[in-house]
Amino acid sequence: MDTIERLESQVRAYVRSFPKVFTEARGNRLTARDGTRYLDFFSGAGALNYGHNDVAMKRALLDYIQRDGINHGLDMATEAKETFLATFEEVILKPRGMDYKLQFPGPTGTNAVEAALKLARKVKGCSRIVHFTHGFHGMTLGSMAVTANAAVRGSAGVGLDDAVLMPYSHYYADGRDTAKDFAALLEDDFSGVDKPAAVIVETVQGEGGINVAEFAWLREIERLCREHDMLLIVDDIQAGIGRTGPFFSFEPAGISPDIVTVAKSLSGMGLPLAMVLLKPELDIWEPGEHTGTFRGNNQAFVTGTAALEIYWRDDALEKETLRKGEYVRERLATIMAEHRHFEAEIRGRGLFIGLACERAEFGNAIIDKCFERGLIMETTGQADGVVKVMPPLISTDADLDEGLAIIEDAIEAVLDKHGLLTGS
């Protein structure tokens, strides 16, 4: 770690939580240089839904490199892009009755969000975007403007304008219908809310604390968008690509977003790739109006195509993710019942699960104890009080049992440290 500490910027974060030099990874296991093996319940913050170094994806990539396939092509036509587009249409769009044009804005999620916001403003001819409490959409200026985290916003160093904040589903503890509040503001000419171009929303707020929007709430937000001539943008960067079960997290809500942003696990094995899905009538870009040197990673197209072929030709992965998610929630509920001094709320959908600790300081304490015991996890939400349980979707029941046992042991260690274990 000396080289990392000496040369890398203080901005580094995850290396502080996991202070090891990692050398190998396969499936849901990582190996450090000292030989220690770790079970992964982190999944690269959602970029590794299929685990590390999937054999078929790796073979497809190696074959592509070996035959001197195009590695960099800007937005030129390449065989790898053509194959990815055709496969995405056949495997994802057509079976779901979806009609979208696909845009490659750059390699990361925030690139996709920036493109989505820019397009919405161009289409509607106005600048304001509605976003929600606890939402997170990226670390570039436009994305930060529609992100709620005060520390993230403060890091911008400039004013973040043209964004209108609204309360997310279940934001208030009294159960108020926040969609009704939003509707009232839109309908009142004296509310001070100027006409927005679009609404951007996550169906499950990952960085905000694994907050889950009710399907009825999402449908009402869509209705308001239609009634008030606003575009609906769903940020599916972390909640999508199977993390909640279906390929898109919004599918069970029965909504049809105008624009969808995806990234993270789109490439299948952690290579940078982001995409914007937009309704065809919104595709009013001029050629080159939104560019980027690395828009369209051809190696990521290769592995992304392999991922679609392996995991999305049928609904087996979706069903297994939903089953495993229920299993994890049930086990966590049992752990809580057996440790009455550990108070927490279980949140999430599929294998996108949060354990929101009543005492927020327990969050980081638990993941530290997990790491000591060979399990990699992270926290999220306010004061890092939500333990994020996010194993790769390919994890077996035995893997889940192993990780859950470590979590229980870590909870007991934290309780014991605070004198709360006796009588649990």
Image: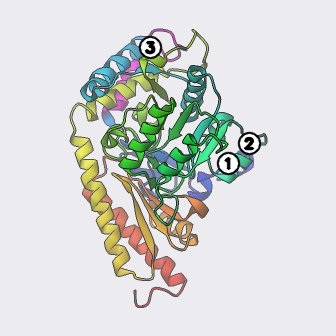
Q: Is disc 3 placed on a helix, strand or loop?
A: loop
Q: Is residue 285 above or below residue 142?
A: above
Q: Is disc 1 placed on a helix, strand or loop?
A: helix
* Residue 2 visible in the current orientation: no
Identify the magenta region. 56-77
**Marks 3/1: CA–CA distance:** 41 Å
Q: Is residue 31 magenta?
A: no
Residue topped by disc 1? 152
Which one is closest to the eye, mark 3 or mark 2?
2
Q: What kind of colouring is applied to the model shown?
A: rainbow
Q: Are marks 1 and 2 in contact (CB under 8 Å)?
A: yes
Q: How many marks?
A: 3
Toward the viewer: 181 or 413?
181
**Marks 3/2: CA–CA distance:** 41 Å
Indicate the position of residue 136 as horizontal and vertical percent values. 57, 46
Quadrant for the C terminus, please: bottom left
Residue topped by disc 3? 68
Packing grade of label 3 (10 A; few <14, some 14-19, many >=20) is few
**Marks 1/2: CA–CA distance:** 7 Å
Q: Amino acid at mark 2?
A: Ala
Which one is closest to the eye, mark 3 or mark 1?
1
Lateral position of residue 122 relative to residue 265, left or right: right
Q: Amino acid at mark 1?
A: Val
Toward the viewer: 36 or 180?
180
Kindly identify the residue that appears in the image at 62 percent across and 22 percent down.
125
Q: Is residue 57 magenta?
A: yes
Kindly identify the residue that appears in the image at 39 percent across and 68 percent down.
406
Q: Amino acid at mark 3?
A: Asp
Which of disc 2 and disc 3 is earlier in sequence?
3
Q: Are marks 3 and 2 in contact (CB under 8 Å)?
A: no
Residue topped by disc 2? 156
Q: Is residue 18 above or below residue 358?
A: above
